[in-house]
Image: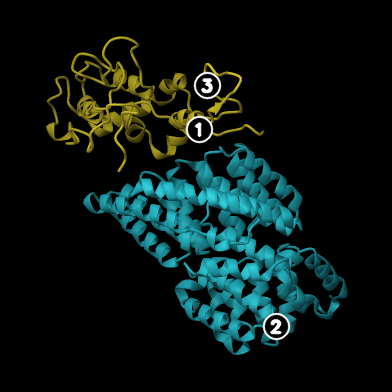
Amino acid sequence: MKNIKIIYSLCLLVTLSLFTISCSDDNPDTGVELDFSGTFAQRDQMGRPAINTVFVSSADKDVFNRATPSTMGGLFSQKFQDRLLALNPGYTTNALGLDAATFTSVLATDILSVATSGKTTFFDGTNVLTGRALDDDVIDVELILIFGGPDGSSNPGLTSDNVSANDKTFSSSFPYLASPW
Amino acid sequence: MKKSIIISGLFIFMMINNLLANKDHLVHHLYNPYLQESMIQEELSFWKSKMISNPTQVYYQKYAACLTKLYGVNADLEYLFEAEDILDMALGLHPPQSSSIYRSMVQIKIKQHRFCEALEDLLLAEKLGDNLNLTNAMFFDVYFELGKDDQVQYYLDILSHENDFDYLIRLARWHDSEGRLSDAILKLEEAKLMISDSDIGKMNWIYSNLADFYGHDGQIDKAFEYYKIALQMNSSDWYSLKGLAWVMYSDNRDVVYAIEILNEISSRYFIPVVENLRYEILSNFGESEKASMVKEKLIAKLDHESYFSSYSGLLFDLLIEDPSNFAILNNILAIEKFNRESPEYYAKYVQLLLISGNEVQARHIAHSEVLDKTFEPDALRRILPAMDDNANVYNFLLEQLKEAKFELGPQKYKIIYGDLI
């Protein structure tokens, strides 16, 4: 019981483990000892930005957030497809050449894939979902794939959030993010 | 600016550690609310500017959350009123997609004891369906305050599936209300072990609440120790400071120190429950002139309808000392009945019936609505005078209240037992 810790998000899992790092005199070489003891429960998850927000209904949020990625496709592909076609009834294929069923089955498994070699990018015109760089305009990419049609030029008013960069310059050193204020 | 705040924060933390280690009574070095308040103000300004330049629901919510946090620091109800207005405006923008806005509203209403209205917001949150566990936890909180035991047990059962912190602290509350204080303490101690060491806010909360429980259980030294630990986590926690003052007063340890602590809180904020404790201590020690001044100031501050729901119990006790206040007492109870028709409400109603000479009805209501429905000493002491026709019940209540000596405090204990002590 002592070590039961509830993890509210995968991000928090990382944060928590950072806080529970303790110096160990027995291991002077490694310096730190990670404490992952206890019983963990998944309460939230996020892979690709905004996908959960846009495609999952309020009533489904808890189920989605607690689902393991391997079950997400089966549970949510159809619902995602219904939502996609409600948002864009004229959807045929998108710039990746994916029809509605294929595209939403990809989206429903809400993970952020990372290629272990090559360029890291959400989408740069050539590489697709090899990871996510901080300055990737992920929302525009998602809007183009949802509303932009086969060549990305359909519904021009809906394919950008008109925010082209972060409001503060990213740091050049770890953790690379800009301070919130 | 931020750096200096952090440095002074560290300094205060170290200073408190030293003070507590030495068990020094230099309370004015212990209480420093400036740090926390200025940090919340900074956050508030940030979200306010976001809200103004980009009026979306999420920024309204963030701003309202800061206002609610400020209320936590200084107990100024105006912050809650503004937070509610802000959330109303946010809800006016468009129907929300997340239930969190309703839960924020529920928090604001619970803090003002507007439990029936809070219930309406919870139903809207439940309908949206996201984060249902948080919504269910709040259903427990509201039904608990309303004294609806069947619903309380229903939601407790749902929450038990998680067996997490939110469940354990509520189970503790439920055990306490059943009169199972030892079990309540065990559950809170279990919940304490679930908190990450880095979650200072939650740690502060649980030590403070455990201190209350230990005090009620007669473990005064433990209560004292836990309040001090809570204060190490948050030096501006007036609730724990008041708890320390109560220990000093109720256990008759060091009343001068108790007043010193209250002075320290009052030098910064006007917190009604703190002033009420000052009034009680002064009255109990025969300082009637000073006590009257405190009482008058308190009544002047709280005698507005917008404050009645939050401070109905406190105002009721102050005003019932003068039977000519019957009309306003009636008004206060009408508001409490609307917000929370619970055994605690009926216990006050019994008192009101007694002072208006309606003993038969008082007795009837005490039997039907209070006895066997609550173990709260504060409710039992109110109905005690109505029970003087039944020696068995009267003596049973006397025994119950004797166990709550610390919780009741010397003054109420003296009123109950009079010559018996």
Q: Which residue is mark 2?
A: B354
Q: Callout 1, which amino acid?
A: Phe
Q: Callout 3, which amino acid?
A: Gly
Left or right placement of residue A91 versus residue B406 in this view: left
Q: Which residue is mark 1?
A: A19
What label sits on residue A31 in the rendered view?
3
The chain carrying label 1 is: A
Residue A49 picture location, percent across and down: 32, 30
Give the residue at x 37% y 29%: A79
Residue A44 picture location, percent across and down: 46, 33
The picture's colour for chain A is: yellow
Q: Could you give the CA–CA distance between mark 3 and mark 1, rounded to whole angstroms?
A: 14 Å
Which of these two is toward me, B139 or A5? A5
- Assess whether mark 1 and mark 3 are in contact (beta carbons under 8 angstroms): no
Residue farthest bottom in this picture: B324
Which of these two is toward me, A155 or B66? B66
Left or right placement of residue B362 versus residue B74 in this view: right
Q: Callout 2, which amino acid?
A: Leu
The picture's colour for chain B is: cyan
The chain carrying label 2 is: B
Give the label, 2 or 3, closer to the camera: 3
Quadrant of residue B189 in the image?
A: top right
Give the residue at x 50% y 64%: B112
Question: Could you say whether the residue bearing mark 2 is in a helix, strand or loop?
Answer: helix
Left or right placement of residue A94 versus residue B254 in this view: left
Q: Could you give the CA–CA distance between mark 2 and mark 3, rounded to whole angstroms?
A: 71 Å
Q: How many residues crowd mark 2 within 10 Å: few (<14), some (14–19), many (20+)?
A: some
- Assess whether mark 3 and mark 2 are in contact (beta carbons under 8 angstroms): no
